[in-house]
Amino acid sequence: MLEPQRMDKVLIVGSKEVMETTINTLHDINLLHMEDYTEEEEYFRIGKPLKSATSLSEKLLKLRSIKSYLGTNAGKYYPKQSREKVLKDLEANLTALESSVTQKMSEKSSLESEQKELAHREELLKPYEALGLSVDLLRGYENINVYIGTVPGDIEPVIKDITDKYEIFSAPYGKGNVVALLVEKSFAPKISEALMKNDFVEVEQLHESGDPAVIKKDLEEKKANMTAKLEVVNKELAELNQKFADFIMSSEELLAIDTQKAEAPLRFATSDNTFVIEGWVPKVDFPALKDTLSKATNDKVYITIIEPVHEKYSTEIEVGEHPEEHKEVDAPVKYNNPKIFRPIEAFTDLYGRPRYDEIDPTMIFAIVFPLFYGFILGDIAYGSILLLLGLLLKVKLKHNEGIQILINVMLVCAVSSIFFGILYGEFLGFAIAEPIEHGEGGIMGLVSFAQFYPHEVHIGPVGPFSLPIERMQAGGFHGDSYMFGIKDLLVFTCIIGVCQLMLGYILGFRNELKQHGLKTAILHKASWALVLAGGVALVWYVFPLALNQALGDFNAMDPLFLIGAIVFLIGFILLLIGEGAMGIIELTTPLSHTLSYTRLLAVGLSSVGIAFAINTIAAMLAEAGILGLIGAIIVFVLGHTVNLVLGTYAPFIQSLRLHYVEFYQKFYKSGGRIYDPFGYNRKYTED
């Protein structure tokens, strides 16, 4: 399960008389990942598409254009339709629907263009509105030049220095003024030069006549008319979409299937009379592929496995040259996970599909990610709200497959949050395991579950300890029972980090062993594992001495320190051999990556700290009369809503980061080819 499915590369050879039957059969069983043929031999050529390909492609193109214009939503539910009905509807509706949609889209485009033109004219009109002059007064003179534009300040003194034969109108506009200057043409060169030096920006001439206010009113009426017409066209397009949505989705699917089949020969090698197909099929599915294809073609095709090359029998006669290089490592990758983990494969694909010869981390991610999420959020109320929200969305968005994947992950994370919330004894930041004394404790001093939490738990040799885990307190012995607190959780997160990093090195060792051999696996992965293990032993011995200020008791011959030092030294030497100088530079990486796991505690503490602050402020407000009570309710609801949003987002990102950055980089390269069998997963049609 931690490896992708094993694949066989198969060769299918047949005469052209059964080529179409072969295509239909391969498409129906949806098992063969075809390899495109590249012309390398003189005898074989790339095949030609079936005769129907051109017609099907044209229809499919038309339909996808219609779908795009109408905005048909593929996320909705549409009942499945039979092939016969879809073909009949295609014949009856496609041409008429294309004509209607084209006409409506043309009308819509024309109206939108007119709207933009009107908006442009409105914009041009604004400076004329500010001046308040009739547009007719500003043009049509033989001996007078008219300058209309904006200037940052008062331009009149500049004009006066040139001539006193002018008329100027000015009004505030934007950050400066808009001016209309009328001056004799004989002064035009000097006036133009002066205006340019004073940052004059000319505005575009209007083609309208009359008062600007009247022009504006006319433009607004035209805009309103255009908007009304556009609404009618949009409504008609929406009605077309509603009426033909199921037809569009089912027809598109059927045409996509038929086009895929018709163009399949473009991937084949063909001669005058034969065709050859190469492709990959899951090893467990090869018998089904062979039997189904043989029956469909009455044994008129030859099917054999060409990769992996089988081991030669002792009596087998050498019939040809063996391939110089084994190509199985290039096989497309199909996941091999149990059904319950398949939604998580999307998160693996987000990082990159595993290579054919490396470990698939999907199952590890599926188990550990929700635990990290719950460890951080850890609140019964927040987890319950997420659970209810997830169930609601699961019902409302049941036809959206992509969203369903996220919702399923959200539900598992919500359950994990409730579980850790019970362990922490937290409900909206209240300590539910705290006994109520003098009206305080528990949930608002009203409800306490202290009696349900044990105080002398024994798990094997561990105990007695009490529950819940108090992550807001230091922890330590209370009487004869130990209470786990923040310092214990801090150590625990480091242990989690060491365990996951060590698992990463072990998986990396396996990958390197398979890909590059034992020597590379030891030098590049075992070396890091030894450095990590030795480093942990050294820290485990030295850290308590430093914490208790007892470094004077340091004993270099202590077995823990001595073994740790030897293991670390061996790992370091191997690292130098394998990684060279880069090994020295990156020597502290295991330490920094281990400490990175403390974010599991830090992010969770920030969330519970905010919740505690919200509760405290709300309690203080509630004591200040009726207005205070209203304020307390607002602070409580709004505060916890914001905290829940942050508390939902942050654990997701941090858990994802710990996997993608700290864990995956120890063993996972990704970059595998996605297994994409020749076929179609029907959603809107049935054969």
Image (cartoon, grey):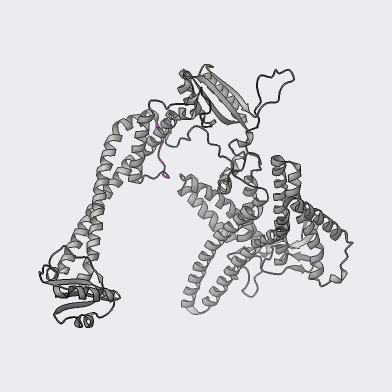
Residue 175 within the segment the image draws in magenta: no
Give the camera-side residue of 18 and 653. 18
The region drawn magenta spans: 73-81
Q: Which residue is drawn at 48% across and 51% down?
A: 393
Left or right: where 142 falls relative to 34: left
Taking depth in this image into account, of 289 and 399 the one nearest to the observer is 289
Q: Residue at x 66, y 19 (%)?
A: 319
* For residue 38, above or below residue 479: above
Name the magenta segment's main secondary structure: loop
Q: Is residue 296 visible?
A: no
Left or right: 513, with 383 as reference point = right
Q: Residue at the spot x=78%, y=51% of the render?
A: 574
Rendered image quadrant of residue 463: bottom right
Check the image and report above or below for 197 versus 395: below
| Relative image position of residue 364 (x, y in whole percent) | 65, 47
| 76 in the magenta segment | yes
x, y (%) of residue 164? 15, 82
Quarter containing the N terminus = top right
Q: Quadrant of residue 181?
A: bottom left
Give the residue drawn at x 20%, y 77%: 170
Q: In which quarter of the image is residue 549?
A: bottom right
